[in-house]
């Protein structure tokens, strides 16, 4: 089969791009289509493939301000020429699935989430925006939302990255999906003995409003216990301003530093709601428990009382209470790390290969093995 992979933009190596890497291993001859491509920010595993961009890539400063061109992306997707491809895999959380699939092809969408900024998080994004964006966002979102709902019918099969996202696909598109959790490189982390565990807690992730990092800072400001925060984003300066001396806001860090802190923290604090949430799995791969808000993907990866604890409301008091409950438990790092291996890259690739093979069986079969219309339709066959 000739395979095309469509991804919203290639400007960094985050969870979505790790999925693309895995798909590249499954289909080493696949071609990749995307809106914007920054080669210097992308892994060699992806760069080995032929990569074609939409006209968005040629617009001014697109590599930095690509999201500003969102209203043009539906038009850009529909101009991509995918004739000749048997299997098209779109990777969706920004606009990617809205391509026009050629006749005879199979279009499978691996959905990280329907676009958050027009669906489930529209009001959060709008409230955090500047005056001009707040004014025009309702009109633009209405246009993109209508196109997104229509283009959902161009997909033959959906794969969701969690049960949480599967529920959104059903709500917004009225489409069923098969769940395959995204790949996490669990083998890159290490489990240390108890005598090497530090006296601090850890928070990791992009420091933006919906992840609620200020709750973690406020909770540890109140208790005086040590907290280390790793990540960059629009709230970095604010968090450094409100943090007391016991809270260290490191900002963005290389993987070596992240791995060091994962394996030595007492527990990971996860106060936001995510579609899946790779960070809790990385912490558990290091044998460390997770204190998580009981919503979204964390409810599918963290086992309460075994690999961590949950809190039920996003408040300072709830985080403090959950931390105390965790301290009363004796959790086993080996069991926590073993659970994380259920979300490994190896598991993802095996499940994707098997599921995609089943979906592509009709076009992969030799001509002699394909059923005629009469053979596939018993009532018609009887008439014939």
Image (cartoon, rainbow, N blue to C red):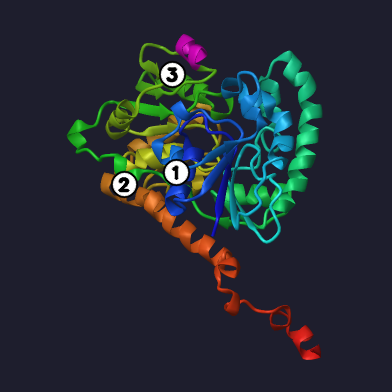
Dot 3, how many residues are within 10 Å of its Cα: few (below 14), some (14-19), or many (20+)? few
Q: CA distance from mark 1 to mark 2?
A: 23 Å
> Is residue 344 among what the camera can see?
no
Whether 206 is drawn above or below 1: the answer is above
Question: Does residue 335 appear to the left or right of 290 in the view shown?
Answer: left
- Could you say where residue 381 lies in the image, as x and y percent from the top left? 75, 87
Q: Quadrant of the C terminus?
A: bottom right
- Could you say where residue 110 lies in the image, as x and y percent from the top left? 57, 49
Question: Does residue 233 appear to the left or right of 328 in the view shown?
Answer: right
Asked where in the image residue 202 lies, by quadrant, the reply is: top left
**Residue holding disc 2:** 337
**Farthest residue, direction top:** 241
Q: Nearer the viewer, mark 1 or mark 3?
A: 1
Residue 222: assigned label: 3
Question: Does residue 306 appear to the left or right of 148 in the view shown?
Answer: left
Magenta stretch holds residue 312 = no
**Residue holding disc 1:** 21
């Amino acid at each position: 089969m000739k395979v095309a992979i469509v991804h919203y933009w290639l400007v960094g190596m985050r969870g979505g791009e790790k999925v693309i890497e895995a798909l590249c291993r499954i289909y080493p001859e696949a071609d990749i289509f995307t809106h914007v491509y920054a080669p210097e920010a992308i892994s060699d595993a992806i760069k080995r493939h032929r990569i074609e961009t939409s006209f968005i890539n040629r617009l001014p400063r697109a590599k930095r301000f690509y999201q500003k061109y969102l209203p043009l992306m539906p038009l850009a997707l529909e101009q991509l020429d995918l004739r000749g491809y048997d299997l098209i895999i779109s990777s969706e959380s920004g606009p990617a699935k809205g391509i026009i699939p050629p006749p005879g092809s199979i279009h499978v969408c691996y959905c990280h989430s329907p676009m958050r900024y027009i669906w489930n998080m529209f009001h959060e994004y709008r409230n955090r925006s500047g005056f001009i964006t707040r004014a025009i966002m309702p009109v633009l979102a209405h246009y993109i939302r209508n196109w997104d709902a229509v283009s959902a019918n161009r997909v033959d099969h959906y794969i969701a990255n969690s049960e949480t996202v599967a529920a959104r696909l059903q709500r917004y598109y009225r489409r069923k999906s098969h769940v395959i959790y995204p790949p996490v490189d669990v083998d890159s982390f290490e489990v240390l003995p108890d005598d090497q565990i530090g006296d601090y807690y850890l928070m990791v992730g992009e420091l933006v409003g919906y992840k609620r990092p200020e709750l973690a800072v406020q909770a540890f400001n109140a208790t005086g216990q040590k907290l280390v925060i790793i990540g960059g984003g629009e709230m970095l300066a604010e968090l450094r301003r409100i943090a007391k001396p016991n809270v260290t806001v490191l900002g963005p860090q290389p993987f070596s530093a992240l791995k060091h802190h994962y394996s030595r923290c007492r527990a990971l604090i996860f106060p936001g709601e995510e579609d899946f949430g790779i960070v809790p799995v990385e912490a558990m791969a290091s044998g460390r428990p997770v204190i998580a808000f009981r919503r979204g993907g964390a409810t599918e990866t963290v086992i309460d009382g075994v690999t961590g604890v949950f809190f039920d409301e996003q408040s300072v008091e709830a985080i403090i209470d959950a931390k105390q409950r965790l301290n009363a438990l004796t959790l086993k790092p080996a069991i926590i790390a073993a659970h994380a291996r259920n979300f490994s890259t190896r598991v993802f690739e095996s499940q994707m290969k098997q599921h995609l093979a089943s979906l592509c069986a009709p076009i992969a079969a030799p001509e002699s093995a394909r059923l005629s219309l009469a053979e596939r339709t018993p009532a018609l066959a009887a008439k014939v």
